[in-house]
Every structure is written in structure tokens, then in C-alpha cells.
Amino acid sequence: MNMLVTAGPTREAIDPVRFLSNRSSGRMGFAVAAKAAEAGHAVRLVAGPVTLETPTGVERIDVVSAGEMCDAVTEHVAWCHALVMAAAVADWRPAVVGSRKLKKGEGPLGLQLERTTDILQSISHRKGERIFVGFAAETGDPEAEATRKLAAKSLDMIVANDVSRPDAGFEVDTNAVTFIDQNGTTRHIETAPKSEIAAEIVTWIEGRL
Ligand code: CTP
């Protein structure tokens, strides 16, 4: 199978030296790419700015902003049989990007933000027989929000995680997740290494194709 995976945060420029981003380390998406390649699948990994090594056998496409990630996914989605969107894509970007470093001046600074494209929604018409898996990083009720996103983004399965837990989500090697599929079937995986959760995601996709 051909698997397209996205991972990491995106960076949205404010000026030549500043940006908006988030705490994603890229570990979950890189683990999915590594496990899929180990299982013998062809893997393309669209990576935001992270400090991780490219897993063996994986073709890596580096991007910086949400717009660049959207362009890369749009370009490669036709190639894949399965897409795993593990990236923490920025939802907003500065409406105006300074061409020179902003000077601090006196008093507060207001930043006008505009929405970025929702990548999954923008490619939903290209889904066809492809399997699309998304992630939902939540600090409230992960399962309720994830179920809403599963439908809104035309996903086959969503991996919900509560990023407010110290042993799950950002910047740690473990995660605690719930798989929710289109039929509403849920499966909880208690705290486990991201590599184990990645292997479960790959196995789930293999079972669908
Ligand atoms: N996603 C995407 N394009 C975006 C934002 C998110 O394709 N611009 C994808 C993510 O990669 C993930 C899924 O959508 O697989 C859910 O992302 P999440 O950040 O949890 O949800 P949002 O749709 O951004 O909603 P909110 O931030 O309001 O919770």
C-alpha cells in the first residue's frame, strides 16, 4: 500500500524572525511512518519543522507553513491508498506578514489572524476508496469532539487524545488514545509508547484495505 503521513506542527510567519506555532513534536506521525515502512508499505511523510530523523525507507517532504502542507498533501494524495493526518496544522496565520522585523515601539501590539485552509476538508472530494485517518487533540471531552470531527472531515477513523494529560499528547513518547471509526465503534488504548499506537494504526488500516 502507498501511505501518505503528515506530522509535526506548522509555523506561520509574523515577520522574518517570528512565527506562531504549537507544541507538536512530530513523534506520533513519524512513528506511524516508521511502522508503515517496516511493514513493507511505500511511505511519503510530509513533515513540518521538527528535529526528528527520517525513518528508514521513508520519503520525506519538508514543509513549514499550513499553506505549504496543504499544497504537499494536495499534490501527493492521488498517489496514496491511505492518508494519516497526524500533523498539528495551524488554524490561523497572521493576516499580514511583515517584510521587515517589527519594531516593538510603545504599548501593546494587536495581531490580526486569518483562518488557514482545513486540509482534510479541502481534499475530502478526492477520497474515493482511500482510507483517511485523522487525529483529534483535545483538552475537553476528547471522544465527543473527535466524533464531531470524524463526520465533518469525512474520515474513516479518528484517533482521539487528551493532550492535557502529562503522559499523552505533545512532547512525550507515550500516548493514551481512543480509536473511533465511522460505525461509532470505539477502542481505547491506555498509556502506551507512540510506536505501539502507531503499529495499531497501521494494522487498522491494513485491515480496511
Ligand atoms: N487538520 C487539517 N487542516 C487544518 C487543521 C487540522 O487537515 N487546518 C487535521 C489535523 O491534521 C487532524 C484533524 O484535522 O487530523 C483534526 O485537527 P484538530 O486540530 O484536532 O481539529 P480542528 O479541525 O483544527 O478543530 P479545533 O482546532 O477547533 O479543535
Image (cartoon, helix red, strand yellow):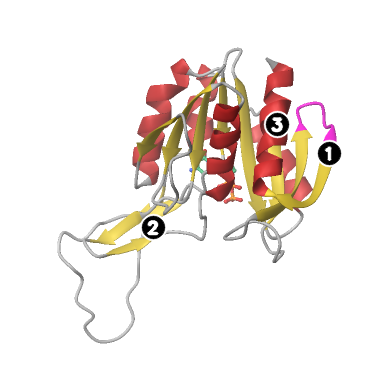
Judged from this view, the residue extending furthest toward the left is 100
Secondary structure type for disc 3: strand
The magenta stretch is 181-186
Compute the Cα span from label 3 to label 1. 11 Å
Compute the Cα span from label 2 to label 3. 30 Å
Q: Quadrant of ligand 1?
A: top right
Judged from this view, the residue extending furthest toward the bottom is 106
Secondary structure type for disc 2: strand
Whether residue 174 can be seen here: yes
Packing grade of label 1 (10 A; few <14, some 14-19, many >=20) is few
Q: Amino acid at mark 1?
A: Arg
Instruction: Please name the residue that numbered disc 1 is placed on.
Output: 187
Residue 12 image offset from top left, x and y in percent: 35, 54
Tell which of 7 and 160 is nearer to you: 7
23 relative position to 137: left or right: left
Q: Amino acid at mark 3?
A: Met
Image quarter of the C terminus: top right
Instruction: Please name the residue that numbered disc 2 is placed on.
Output: 113
Compute the Cα span from label 1 to label 2. 37 Å
Residue 61 image offset from top left, x and y in percent: 37, 35
